[in-house]
Amino acid sequence: MQQVILYTKATCTLCDEAEALLSSFKKDYPHQLIKRDIYSNEKWLERYQLEIPVIEIDGKQLNAEEINYNSLKLLLTAGYKGELEQ
């Protein structure tokens, strides 16, 4: 099963929306969601502070400005193609 990492923080409306969008793809693209609070790790905080939410699949990332239905579907599809090739 594909792993999807969501970099987030508490009380983040955009993060909630990104998680809901991910949830809408769960049936067609089953995945394990791993939520990472950027305030629990200094490296994550430094890197993602101004970009959250960030969705990462197989090292490829979408930041807050890039997350939408089409871009997430492409990212999930690319991950599944890679998973099938392994």
Image: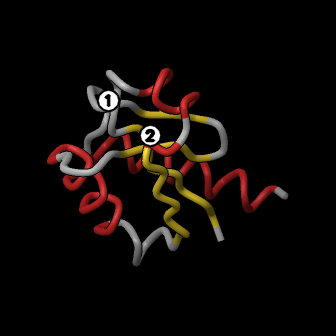
Q: Position of residue 51 (x, y in %)?
A: 34, 26
Callout 2, which amino acid? Ile
- The local crowd at label 1, few if under 14, some if 14 to 19, many if 20 or more residues have their Cα within 10 Å, is some
- Residue in the foreground of this view, choosing between 81 and 62: 62
Callout 1, which amino acid? Glu
Q: Residue furthest right?
A: 86
Labelled pair 1, 2 in contact (Cβ < 8 Å): no
Q: Calculate the distance from the C-alpha at mark 1 to the C-alpha at mark 2.
A: 19 Å
In the rendered image, the vertical position of residue 19 relative to residue 28, given as above or below? above
| Residue marked by disc 1 | 66
Badge number at residue 34:
none
Q: Position of residue 73 (x, y in %)?
A: 40, 50
Q: Residue furthest left?
A: 13
- Residue in the foreground of this view, choosing between 26 and 12: 12
| Residue marked by disc 2 | 38
Question: In what quadrant of the picture does the C terminus appear?
Answer: bottom right
Question: In what quadrant of the picture does the N terminus appear?
Answer: bottom right
Q: Residue furthest bottom?
A: 27
Q: How is the image coloured?
A: secondary structure
- Residue in the foreground of this view, choosing between 41 and 12: 41
In what element is the residue under mark 2?
A: helix
Q: Could you tell whether 41 is left or right of 10 in the image?
A: right
- The local crowd at label 2, few if under 14, some if 14 to 19, many if 20 or more residues have their Cα within 10 Å, is many
Q: Position of residue 72 (x, y in %)?
A: 38, 46
> Nearer the N terminus, badge 1 or badge 2?
2
Q: Quadrant of residue 3?
A: bottom right
Residue at x 66% of width, y 45% of height: 58
Residue at x 49% of width, y 45% of height: 40
In what element is the residue under mark 1?
A: loop
- Residue in the foreground of this view, choosing between 47 and 82: 47
